[in-house]
Amino acid sequence: MDEDITRFISVLKKSQLADNIVYAKTMEGKEGILYPIPSFIDASLKKNLSERGIEKVYSHQHEGLTLLNEGNNIIVTTPTGSGKTLIYNLSVITRLKKDSKSKALYIFPTKALAQNQLKTLKEFAADITAEIYDGDTTQDARKRIKNRLPDILITNPDMLHIGILPFHNRWCNFFSQLNFVVIDEVHTYRGIFGSQVAHIIRRLRRICRHYGKYPQFILLSATIDKPADFAEKLTSIPFVSVEKSSSPEGRKHFIFMDAGPESPYPLAINTLFANLKFGLSTILFTQSRKASELLHMWIHRRIGRFDPKVSAYRAGYLAEERHDIEKKMFSGEMKGIISTSALELGIDIGSLDCCILFGYPGSITSTWQRIGRVGRSKKDSIIIFIGMQDALDRYFIKNPEEFFRRKFEDVIINPYNPIISEAHLKCASFELPIEDKDAQLYGKQLMSILEKKPFLKTPDGKKYCFIGKPPHMDINIRTISDIFAIVEIGTDRLIGEIDGSRVFSECYPGSIYLHQGKQYEILLIDIEKKCVTAKRSKVDFYTQPNWWEKIEILEEENKKDKEFPIRLGKIKVTTQVISYEKRREKDKTLIGRYQLILPPQQFQTKSIWIEISSGKMVDLKKKMDFQGSIHAVEHAIIGILPLTVTCDRWDIGGYSFSFHPQTKAATIFIYDGYPGGIGIVDTAYSRSTLILKSAYEVIRTCKCDTGCPSCIQSPKCGNNNNPLDKKGALLLLKQMIPN
C-alpha cells in the first residue's frame, strides 16, 4: 500500500487537480523505542502479549505503567495509535488479578467508544468481567449488572450523571471497592460539556469518599498543552503527565490544496473521487453538519456509481444508522466516509489510507487527532488539506509551515460557570448533604449558591440538602439548552435532534434541513413539546437566517486603559431571528427574503469589548465607512480567535455598535457564546494584543479588494455581511495594536 500511496501522489500531481496544489511536504517516519515489560505486570498478561508478538512496550507505555504502580494519578497525551489503551488495561487488570474485590470504572465520551473498549477487553483478558452500563443497556441487563457487579464497569458521563450517581446506594458495593477511574479522550471535555463533566467527576469523588475510597485516576487525551494543569482543573486533584511518544510512525505525505476564488466543494468532491478510483480508503472531515450533508448529497448526484461506497456521518444520526456505517467502513464494504468531528475519536473503522481535511479543524489538537486516524502501524498515509474561504484556512494556505510549527492548545473549561455550578450542586446535595469540606471541590462561590432556594440547611446548620424531585433529569450535560426532536410529518419518523440554542437559527419555518444527503423543509417549531416538524423536499436553493442583537453590560471585571480601552466583564445578550433568505445553490443568487415571527432568546455571558472614543470616531469617520470598519474588525477577530484560544468561531458571538448607550462610545463586543461563559474570552483578554495583530495580518495579506470570506466576511453574520469596509478595518486595527 505504501507504493500505491506514492504512485497516487505522483498521479495526483499530473492530474487536473495539480493546479490546486499549493504546497507539499513529507514527514519521515520513525522507529519505536522499546523497553522491557515491567516485572510487576501480571504474568498471564505478559503471556497474552507474547502470543500476539508483543515482547516489549514503548518507553512512554513503560513510563505510564511505572507511575501508576507508584500510586500516581496520570494523564497520557500521546498521539492516536500510540498504545495508550495498553497502559491502563495492563495496570488495571494486573490489580484486578491480585485483588478479587477490586473494581474499575471506565468512562468514554461516546457509546461507540465503549463498545470498542469492551471488545478489546474481552480479547485481552477473557477471565476479567466487564459490562457496559449506558442508555442502550436493557432493564434486565441493568438489574443483572447491579446484582452481579463486573470487575470493570464501562459507561459514559451522561449515564454516570443520570443513572449511577443519583442511585449510589444501589451501587455501594461497587464504590466501596473502586480503585481505578479511567477517563478516555479527555480533550473532548471542553466548553460546556467539559465544564459539566468536571462537576460530575467532583460528584463521583464525593461519593467514593463517602464509601471510604480514593481511586487512582487515569486520563487519556490527544496531545494538548499543559495536560497536568487541565487534568487537575477537570478533577480537582494533582496529576503527573506522560507526553513524549516513542511509538513508531510511517511517513506522512501532506498536500495543501486551494480552490482560489471558486467554491471549494467541487475540489473536495473531485479529490475524494480520485481517492476512491485509486482504491484508497478515505475519511473526509468537515467543519459542520451542513457541509457533510451537502458533500454527501452532491456526490450522490454527480458520481452515483460510487455512492454506495460513501456515506456521511455526524452527531444527530440515530444509533443504528451510525453503527451500520461503522461496520461497513470496518469491513471494507464502504471506502469513503464524510464526517464531522464525530469520528475524530478512536472509534475503530478499520485501516485508512487518506485523511482529507475540508477546512481547518479549529485547533491544532483536533487537526492532529484527525490526522491520527490514518497511517497506523508504520503505514504511509496521505493528508490533504483543502482550504475553505475562511480566515483561518487562508492563514494556513499562505503560511503552510505555520501549520506544522503551531503549539498544541490548552483545553478551556469553566467549572465555576454559575449556571452549571448551581445545577450540579443541586444534584450533589441530592446525592449527599454538602459539607464545609466540599469547598475545596467547588471554590469560593459554594456558599453564595447554597444560600439560595431550594437548598435547605440541616438542623445542626452544618450541611445543605436539596429539596424537591431529583434534579438530574433536567440537566443535559452536552449543552445548557434543551434538545429538540426533528420529526418527519406524516410518518412521525425521528430524523434527528438539534440543540435548543441553535433551533431558531437552523430550523426556523421555511429553512432547508439536510440529513444523510436528503433535503427537508422545516414547517413548524413547537417550543412546548421541544419538537420540529419537517417534510421531505427537493430544491435547488439553500436558506440562511438574519437576526438583530442587543447587548447590555452587567458588570466590568477588568480593564486595559489604552488608546483603545479593552474591557472584560459580564453582559446580557438578546437575539432574535427576524427573517431568512433563499439563495441558489449554484451561484448564491438571492431568490427572496421572508419575514419570521420567532421569540427572542436571552442569556448572560462573559465578554471583552473595545471602546472607540467619540474623538477617535470623528477622526476615523473622515477616512472610512465607520460602521463597516468596526463590523469588519469584529468579524476578523472572531475568525482568527481560534488560533490563540481553544474554540471555534461557532463558540463565539460578536456585535459592533457605532454608539453604545452604556459605554457612550463606539464599541466592539466579542463574547462567549454560552450562558455563563466557559473561559474563552478570559483567555482572549489575556492575549488581546496577539489576537489584534493576527487579525491585522490576515486582512493585510488577503488579495481581495473589498473583503471576502477569507478575511472579513463571516458565515454566521446575522446582517448578511453588510456593511463591511476592508481598508477601514486595516486602518482601525493598525491604530489599536500597541507600539
Image (cartoon, rainbow, N blue to C red):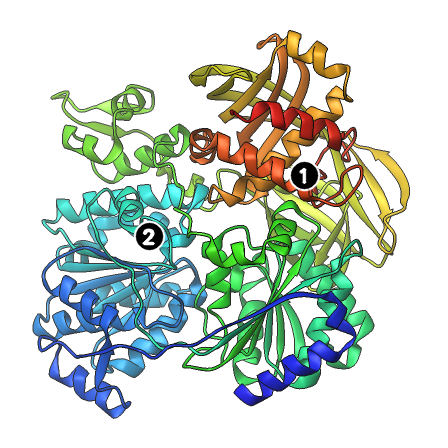
Residue at (36% x, 77% y) in the render = 248
Residue corresponding to mark 2: 160
- Spot occupied by residue 328 in the image (x, y as percentages of width and height): 57, 80
Question: Hey, which quadrant is residue 493 in on the image?
Answer: bottom right
Q: Is residue 548 visible?
A: no
For marks 1 and 2, the one nearer the N-term is 2
From the viewer's perspective, is 689 left or right of 122?
A: right
Q: 635 and 52: which one is in front?
A: 635
Q: What residue type is labelled 2?
A: Leu
Residue at (53% x, 43% y) in the render = 642
The reply to whether dot 1 and dot 2 touch (C-beta < 8 Å) is no
Q: Can residue 214 be seen in this view?
A: yes
Q: Residues within 10 Å of mark 1 (few under 14, many from 20)?
A: many
Residue at (75% x, 72% y) in the render = 17
- Spot occupied by residue 622 in the image (x, y as percentages of width and height): 77, 15
In the image, residue 158 sits, relative to residue 450, either above or below, namely below
In the image, residue 239 sits, relative to residue 731, either above or below, namely below
- Helix, strand or loop status at disc 2: helix
Q: 445 and 152: which one is in front?
A: 445
- Spot occupied by residue 558 in the image (x, y as percentages of width and height): 41, 18
Residue corresponding to mark 1: 699
- Spot occupied by residue 491 in the image (x, y as percentages of width and height): 72, 59
Q: Which amino acid does label 1 sit on?
A: Ile
In the image, residue 579 sits, relative to residue 519, either above or below, namely above
**Disc 1 or disc 2, which is closer to the eye?**
1
For marks 1 and 2, give the CA distance: 47 Å
Q: 637 and 529: which one is in front?
A: 637
- Helix, strand or loop status at disc 1: helix
